[in-house]
Image (tube, rainbow, N blue to C red):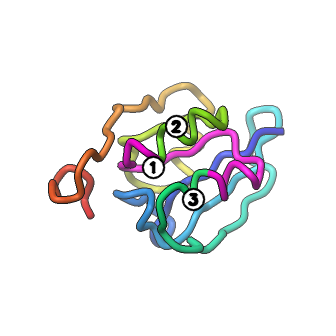
Amino acid sequence: MMKIAVASDNGKVSGHFGHCEAFMIYDVEDNKIVNSEKVANPGHRPGFLPNFLADRGVNVIISGGMGGGAVAIFNERNVEVVIGADGDAETNVHAYLNGSLESTGSVCHEHQHIDECGV
């Protein structure tokens, strides 16, 4: 089984990973979603969220934008990072599963560049 998490706000992909309202976590078997759960964002603090999700068994994280520190921790934990996504959370999971969702590599380097990550 694979677990795919989507940083989301009201069912849509969040523009910034750390500040999303919740994570939609989808359980996938045989390329099909078999279960989903909404997990409230427990709070943004450096280094916490990537480990929080990895500890829940997440294999893939989908988000609009994400800071480089979070990307590095996900990489260390062998969690695939897909950034630059937008729109409906579940639609993006289906796109990932059928191979049509590609990461833009849109890493938010500095928070003062507000337009880059939609914070």
Up-down: is 45 above or below 70? below
Query: How many discs appear?
Result: 3
On residue 63, which mark appears? Answer: 1
Q: Amino acid at mark 1?
A: Ser
Side of 68 where 61 appears, left or right:
right
Q: Amino acid at mark 3?
A: Leu
Side of 91 where 59 appears, left or right:
right
Q: Earlier in the sequence, mark 1 or mark 2?
A: 1
Name the image quarter holding the N terminus.
top right
The alpha-carbon separation of the residues under discs 3 and 1 comes to 13 Å
Q: Residue at x 49, y 63 (%)?
A: 8
Q: Residue at x 51, y 46 (%)?
A: 62
Q: Amino acid at mark 2?
A: Val
Side of 52 where 95 appears, left or right:
left
Give the x, y percent position of residue 83. 41, 41
Residue 54 on the magenta segment: yes
The alpha-carbon separation of the residues under discs 2 and 3 comes to 13 Å
Query: Which element type, helix, strand or loop, lies under badge 1?
Result: strand
Please say if the residues under marks 1 and 2 sit with CB atoms less than 8 Å apart.
yes
| Residue toward you, 48 or 88 | 48
Side of 105 where 34 appears, left or right:
right
Instruction: Report the residue marked by disc 2.
Output: 81
Residues in magenta, as a range = 51-69
| Residue toward you, 47 or 85 | 47
Query: Splitting the image into 4 quarters, where does residue 96 fall?
Result: top right
Query: Which element type, helix, strand or loop, lies under badge 2?
Result: strand
Instruction: Report the residue marked by disc 3.
Output: 49
- Between disc 3 and disc 1, the foreground one is 3
